[in-house]
């Protein structure tokens, strides 16, 4: 009995220790994580709905579903699980929400009826059946209409019923034709990862009957095209805030569209307003005649319109320098009564990201990126008087903390509290809430002692509690131009300061991007730091925010213009030098550099300028600056960054082109490229690999025929991580 009691006592102490044991983060762990979308607060403020993407690695699929959580806190749960369901948007009555689903006829708009007391879906109905499919749906504030986008053939513009039939006919003819040739007569014939095939993105509106109407039996109405013509409306976007919005009375929409003759070389997105009533009996010319450009005098980009709740203003983001996609995004205010416009953030030297109005239209809340984190700020427009504006910082964490993570996707909740997404290097996106309080000062002033943001969802907490990760560590050093430059370091799990560790030196893309306290599925520093079969101790990961990176002011961003291999390269080398001297656990004889997009360019530049690395990984990088100009789709980018075209300023392209230094190539290099990458054509990867082989440099190429600039398919991602890690292991062991 004594031995039994002793055994039970030992077991009682051992089981908790076993339960708390953590294993290093793995790729399979990452694929099991649920990917949380942007929050949408119900009109009564009681519920938050959002999408969650589930990854099935073996099926090679990503499937979104709709979840809900009480705004006051409580258990989150799935409410649409029997079909793919994405981008939920509440109806003004709070009894329904719209969402997108591929269940029937490709991507279409559906509506779910909701029991508001229980937070449960009672029925779902399909609202659209448009041949060219639907996306980006948005409910009008008066509850009568749903707006959505669709890629259509502009020559089909006309009567709504005939327009859909025309688009359906064109699609069927293209699908059945044995000739797959395309004919182009203007630039931007392909974008990002797809050929336009003669289509344009247009905004449609469809009337939706009330609950109990025909919605449960028939498609409710024929959609009307509000943006006919040979233009994209809205403009192309990779995510973020919508580039269109309804007025508070539901009678007007504002959207972004570029009507320049050559949009491939232009960033001149303008804001246009059009009555929702157009399209019924109006010809395309009549619709255009009723459409007004409210930013015609700004030749740079104007995007992300959002009406104030009282209807007086349209807030939007704008740049000032035409042709420069990385100019500072200011928050602008357009007075609908007077037509007056002004910047509300001229004295803020950071890009404005997503934003939202307060319920009484007196304040705006926005996210800004700063030094590796993204925080929420609040400001008062004070009726266009900048001298009365009160800039207020909204703390999304303990203000004494060294890291605030990345906050985004702002949504307004009762009493002007905020609901938003937040992620960090150690945790993917969850939904948080800040507030509420009884006054603006109580909620948003940190000195008030108000509690910080609290998590509403904990969808991935259980899995991550079993995983060993390391925090992001910041360091600063003197870089190019004697400027202070920030770097980051991630230690391997189960770190031992007495050991020496090999290094993975990551270089970010953009180039106007940044490393920081955020989560990534494509380039995950925690996963790169984890042990591999060949390197069981793991890696130290180092990242540098070189000149050109965002979050350090516009002057720092502009420093890379026309200097791609200059100051940024100097920062990268000095940053690594600093890390080697400062952190004694770094083994400087076992370092590999990895980068994608601009990071891929930087790797190609490193190839010709230093032999300090044991290996390199170049993903989707520019190799020949002149050929990259002729094969990219967004010509404004190369024209700005290299200060002209190759035939106007060839010297700049030659000076900064990595292929000019091929005779210096020695470092073993893994080349990766996707066939559908139209930002940097696959020919750049082929040229690099051919040159490495011809020069006798140990090299290998990983080619994805079904990926673009990003590797997105789950099994392709698994292969990508395996090939990259195996390559680094091979040369640093």
Image (spheres, rainbow, N blue to C red):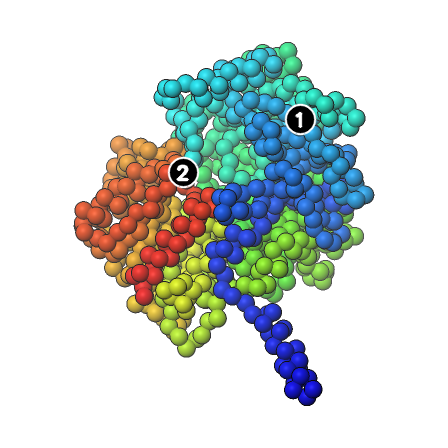
Picture quarter containing residue 149? Answer: top right
Q: Nearer the viewer, residue 314 or 717?
A: 717
Q: Is residue 17 left or right of residue 605?
A: right
Residue 619 horizontal/vertical position (percent): 36, 47
Q: Confirm or deny contact between disc 2 and disc 1 (CB under 8 A).
A: no
Residue 314, position as x, y percentages in the image: 64, 33
Instruction: Give the residue pinned by disc 1.
Output: 127
In the current view of this chain or complex, which residue is farthest to the right?
Answer: 117
Q: Secondary structure at mark 2?
A: loop
Q: Which residue is mark 2?
A: 706
Look at the image and tell me in which quarter the C terminus lies: bottom left
Quadrant in which the N terminus is drawn = bottom right
Decide if residue 124 is in sight here. yes
Image coords of residue 507 (percent x, y)? 39, 54
Label 2 or label 1, whichever comes before in sequence order: 1
Residue 418 position (above or below residue 12): above
Residue 310 seen: no
Residue pictured at 74% horizontal, 39% vertical: 121
Residue lying at 28% horizontally and 50% vertically, measured from the top left: 700
Q: Residues within 10 Å of mark 2 (few under 14, many from 20)?
A: some
**Residue 611 vs residue 688, the one in the foreground:** 688
């Amino acid at each position: 009995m004594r031995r039994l009691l002793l055994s039970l006592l030992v077991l009682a102490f051992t089981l908790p220790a076993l339960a708390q044991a953590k294993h290093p983060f793995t790729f399979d762990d990452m694929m099991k994580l649920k990917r949380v979308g942007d929050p949408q607060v119900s009109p009564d403020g009681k519920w938050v709905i959002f999408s969650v993407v589930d990854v099935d690695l073996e099926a090679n699929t990503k499937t979104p579903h709709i979840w809900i959580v009480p705004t006051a806190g409580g258990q989150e749960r799935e409410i649409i699980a029997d079909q793919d369901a994405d981008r939920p948007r509440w109806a003004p009555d709070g009894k329904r929400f719209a969402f997108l689903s591929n269940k029937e006829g490709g991507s279409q708009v559906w509506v779910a009826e909701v029991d508001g007391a229980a937070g449960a879906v009672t029925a779902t109905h399909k609202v659209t059946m448009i041949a060219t499919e639907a996306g980006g749906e948005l409910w009008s504030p008066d509850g009568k209409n749903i707006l959505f986008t669709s890629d259509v053939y502009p020559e089909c513009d006309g009567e709504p019923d005939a327009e859909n039939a025309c688009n359906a006919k064109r699609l069927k003819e293209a699908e059945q034709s044995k000739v797959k040739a395309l004919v182009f007569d203007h630039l931007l014939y392909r974008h990002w990862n797809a050929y336009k095939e003669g289509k344009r993105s247009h905004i449609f509106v469809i009337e939706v009957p009330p609950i109990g109407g025909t919605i449960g039996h028939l498609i409710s109405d024929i959609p009307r095209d509000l943006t006919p013509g040979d233009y994209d409306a809205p403009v192309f976007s990779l995510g973020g805030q919508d580039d269109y919005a309804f007025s508070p009375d539901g009678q007007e929409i504002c959207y972004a569209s570029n009507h320049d003759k050559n949009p491939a070389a232009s960033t001149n997105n303008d804001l246009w307003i059009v009555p929702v009533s157009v399209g019924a009996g109006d010809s395309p010319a009549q619709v255009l005649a009723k459409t007004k450009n409210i930013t015609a005098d700004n030749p740079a980009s104007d995007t992300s319109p959002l009406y104030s709740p009282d209807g007086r203003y349209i807030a939007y983001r704008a740049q000032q320098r035409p042709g420069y996609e990385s100019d500072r995004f200011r928050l602008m205010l357009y007075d609908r009564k007077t037509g007056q416009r002004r910047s509300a953030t001229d004295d803020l030297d950071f890009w404005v990201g997503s934003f939202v109005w307060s319920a009484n239209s007196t304040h705006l809340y926005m996210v800004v990126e700063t030094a590796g984190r993204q925080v929420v700020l609040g400001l008062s427009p004070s009726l266009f008087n900048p001298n009365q504006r009160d800039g207020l910082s909204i703390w999304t964490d303990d203000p004494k903390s060294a890291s605030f993570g990345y906050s985004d996707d702002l949504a307004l909740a009762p009493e002007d509290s905020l609901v938003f997404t937040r992620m960090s290097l150690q945790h993917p996106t969850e939904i948080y809430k800040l507030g509420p309080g009884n006054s603006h000062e109580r909620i948003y002033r940190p000195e008030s002692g108000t509690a910080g943001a609290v998590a509403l969802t904990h969808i991935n907490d259980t899995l991550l509690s079993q995983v060993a990760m390391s925090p992001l560590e910041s360091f600063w050093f003197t870089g190019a131009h004697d400027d202070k430059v920030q770097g980051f370091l991630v230690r391997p799990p189960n770190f031992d300061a007495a050991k020496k560790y090999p290094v993975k030196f990551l270089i970010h893309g953009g180039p106007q991007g940044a490393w920081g306290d955020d989560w990534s599925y494509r380039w995950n520093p925690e996963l790169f730091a984890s042990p591999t079969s060949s390197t069981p101790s793991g890696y130290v990961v180092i990242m540098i925010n070189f000149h050109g990176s965002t979050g350090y002011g516009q002057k720092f961003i502009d420093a890379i213009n026309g200097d791609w291999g200059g100051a940024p390269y100097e920062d990268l080398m000095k940053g690594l030098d600093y890390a080697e001297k400062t952190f004694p656990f770094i083994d400087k004889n076992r370092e590999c550099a990895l980068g994608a997009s601009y990071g891929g360019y930087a790797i190609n530049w490193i190839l010709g300028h230093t032999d300090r690395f044991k290996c390199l990984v170049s993903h989707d990088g520019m190799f020949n600056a002149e050929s990259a100009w002729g094969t990219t789709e967004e010509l404004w980018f190369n024209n700005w960054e290299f200060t002209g075209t190759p035939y106007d300023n060839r010297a700049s392209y030659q000076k900064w082109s990595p292929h000019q230094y091929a005779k210096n190539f020695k470092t073993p290099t893994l080349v990766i490229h996707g066939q559908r990458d139209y930002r940097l054509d696959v020919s750049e990867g082929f040229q690099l690999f051919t040159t490495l082989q011809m020069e006798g440099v140990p090299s290998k190429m990983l080619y994805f025929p079904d990926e673009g600039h990003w590797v997105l398919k789950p099994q392709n991602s698994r292969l990508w991580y395996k090939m990259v890690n195996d390559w680094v292991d091979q040369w640093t062991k």
